[in-house]
Image (tube, rainbow, N blue to C red):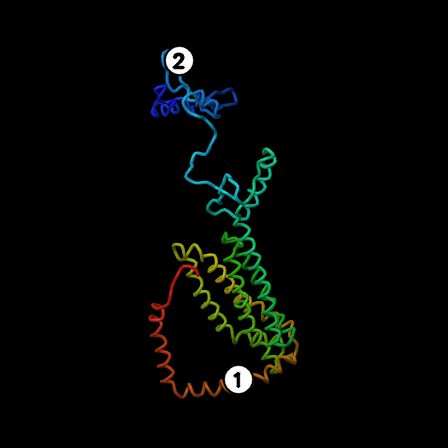
Amino acid sequence: THMAAYGVTATDINQALRRDNYISAAGTTRGPLVRASVDAETDVQDPSSFADIVVRQIGDKRVHLGDVAEVELASSNYDSAAYSSGQETVFIAITEAPGANPLEMAANVKAKLKEIESRLPADLKIFSDSDLSVYISEALTRVAITLIEATIIVILVILIFLGSLRVVAIPIIAIPLSLITVLFLIWMMGFSINLLTLLAMVIAIGLVVDDAIVVTENVHRHIENGEAPFLAAINGAREVALPVMAMTLTLVAVYLPIGFLGGLTGILFSEFALTLAGAVFISGVLALILSPMMCAFLLADHDHQGTIANWLDQKFTRLYQTYERLLDQCLKNRGAVMLFAFGIFLSLPALYLVSQSELAP
């Protein structure tokens, strides 16, 4: 080979590359108002410069790297190769830094790539082979659509069962007010609008109207019994204040601890848990403050249910009677009911042990 002909070894080439290809700081220069660092261009930057590196001196003759090797610009690693649609490519993976917004990062990268592509030769193209931000954006869109659909379904269900539009308006108003306040809490806690926070808001829609429905229905019952709306709002809200507070705090106590878990579980579900707990707490506050006030102003004297609600009440009469008979039998056989409940409680550890478990489905 050429190396053997010139008596050049691999060690000679390695030493020559280390000797002639390095980065050196030449020092600093300064003036009355300026101080600047000076760098010497001691590193080799193109194939021809590498080919001119002297690897050995034989008398007056210098042996250059180009004499014993073929110098070309190539890959630093041949253990792997990247192909797209059968074409050899140069693959560059770009990932966001911890805490960065992937959607914002993807938008900035695409804008920068367009700027770079405009300066490339005509035969070079830049394209994105895989963009996870597209899937994230689509998932966020689907969850947002689900949020709207869930809101519409909840409104229709409330309208069917409560009947009166004025009665329905009160718990319905609680939905956007609660969600708007939750968005403020998300901003205050430093969270973002992501899959987990949107999912928490979807679940919260059904929860935030519960308290408002309980208060509104009780005030509506007082009005049907002949009380004035203002007095009915006071008495109705006072009667259910403690149950509403207990129900709200119970739900908060269930979701809130999840937000303070450590490890991977805490990282994944802290935003979900804190968002959901905040939504439930806000709904309880609105139910005890805003709902009675709206009942006093929106509900009219003897504001009866609509035709659909009356029809549903008639259909549910048989169900009520069946439930009453079943409840009467349970109260007469308290021992058997307690024994059955105790058996279910004892079976929980066994059911937990035999159930399959994993981090995510």
Q: Residue at x 59, y 61 (%)?
A: 145
Q: Of callouts 2 and 1, which one flags the residue occurring earlier in the amino acid sequence?
A: 2
Camera-side residue: 197 or 256? 197
| Residue sitting farthest toward the top | 60
| Amino acid at pointer 1 | Leu
User: Element at badge 2?
Assistant: strand
Camera-side residue: 165 or 231? 165
Q: Residue at x 35, y 81 (%)?
A: 339
| Amino acid at pointer 2 | Lys
Local packing at callout 2 (Cα closer than 10 Å; few below 14, some 14-19, many 20+) is few
Above or below, comparing residue 350 to residue 102 in the picture: below
Judging by the rendered image, the residue that carries numbered circle 2 is 61
Judging by the rendered image, the residue that carries numbered circle 1 is 319
Kindly indicate the quadrant of the structure image that contains residue 19.
top left
Above or below, comparing residue 339 to residue 197 in the picture: below
- Please state the horizontal and vertical placement of residue 143, each as a whole percent of the image: 55, 60
User: Seen in the image, is 137 located left or right of residue 339?
Assistant: right
Mark 2 touches mark 1? (CB < 8 Å): no
Q: Residue at x 33, y 71 (%)?
A: 350
